[in-house]
Image (tube, rainbow, N blue to C red):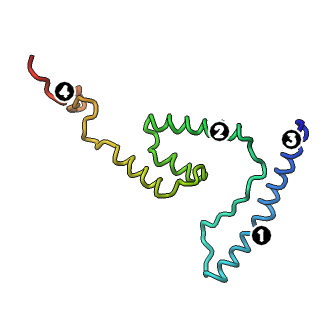
C-alpha cells in the first residue's frame, strides 16, 4: 500500500477508536452496572473496559520494541532500580509468554528479597566505622590478613 492508503486506514482506525471511547464506552459501562446490580448487588469499582487495538504493528516493529524494553529492563536491573519481579509482572500483564503465571511473579519477588543483602552486612570486603559528623569514617579490612 502507498503512503496515502496507510494514512487513510490509520485515520479510519482512529475514528473507530474515538467512537468506541466517546459513544460505546459510556453505554457499556451503564449496561455492566445494571447487570452487576441485578445479579450481584454492586458493580466493582475497578471495572475496566478494554477495546482491541485495530492498528497492528508489524512483526519487525514489535520485535524492535520488545528488544528496547528488554535492554531497558536489563539496565534498570543492573543498577538496582527495579527487582526481577517488575519486568516479570510486566511480561505477565502483556501476556508475552503464555506459560507465565502470577506464581512466577511472586517467586521473582521472593528471590529479589532473598538476594538483597541486609544493611549491616559488608559486601565490599571492608567495614566502615562511622564516627561523629566531624570525624572521617575509618575503613578497616573485614577479614584479618595472615601475618607475613
Residue that label 3 marks: 6
- Tag in front: 3 or 4: 3
**Quick one: SS at disc 3?**
helix
> Residue 16: x percent and y percent?
83, 55
Q: Residue at x 62, y 40 (%)?
A: 66
- Tag in front: 2 or 1: 2
**Quick one: SS at disc 1?**
helix
N-terminal-most mark, 2 or 3: 3
Residue 99, located in which quarter of the rendered image?
bottom right
Residue that label 4 marks: 141
**Quick one: SS at disc 2?**
helix
Mark 3 vs mark 4, CA separation in Å:
66 Å
Residue that label 2 marks: 65
Q: Is residue 104 visible?
A: yes
Residue that label 1 marks: 27
N-terminal-most mark, 3 or 4: 3
**Quick one: SS at disc 4?**
strand
N-terminal-most mark, 4 or 2: 2
Amino acid at each position: 500500500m502507498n503512503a496515502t492508503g496507510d494514512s487513510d486506514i490509520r485515520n479510519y482506525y482512529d475514528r473507530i477508536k474515538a467512537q468506541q471511547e466517546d459513544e460505546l464506552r459510556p453505554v457499556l459501562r451503564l449496561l455492566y452496572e445494571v447487570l452487576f446490580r441485578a445479579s450481584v448487588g454492586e458493580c466493582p469499582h475497578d471495572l475496566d473496559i478494554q477495546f482491541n487495538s485495530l492498528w497492528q504493528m508489524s512483526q519487525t516493529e514489535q520485535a524492535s520494541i520488545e528488544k528496547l524494553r528488554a535492554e531497558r529492563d536489563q539496565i534498570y536491573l543492573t543498577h538496582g532500580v527495579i527487582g526481577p519481579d517488575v519486568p516479570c509482572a510486566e511480561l505477565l500483564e502483556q501476556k508475552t509468554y503464555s506459560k507465565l503465571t502470577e506464581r512466577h511473579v511472586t517467586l521473582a519477588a521472593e528471590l529479589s528479597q532473598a538476594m538483597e543483602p541486609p544493611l549491616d552486612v559488608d559486601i565490599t570486603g571492608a567495614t566502615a566505622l562511622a564516627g561523629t559528623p566531624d570525624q572521617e569514617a575509618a575503613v578497616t579490612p573485614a577479614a584479618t590478613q595472615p601475618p607475613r
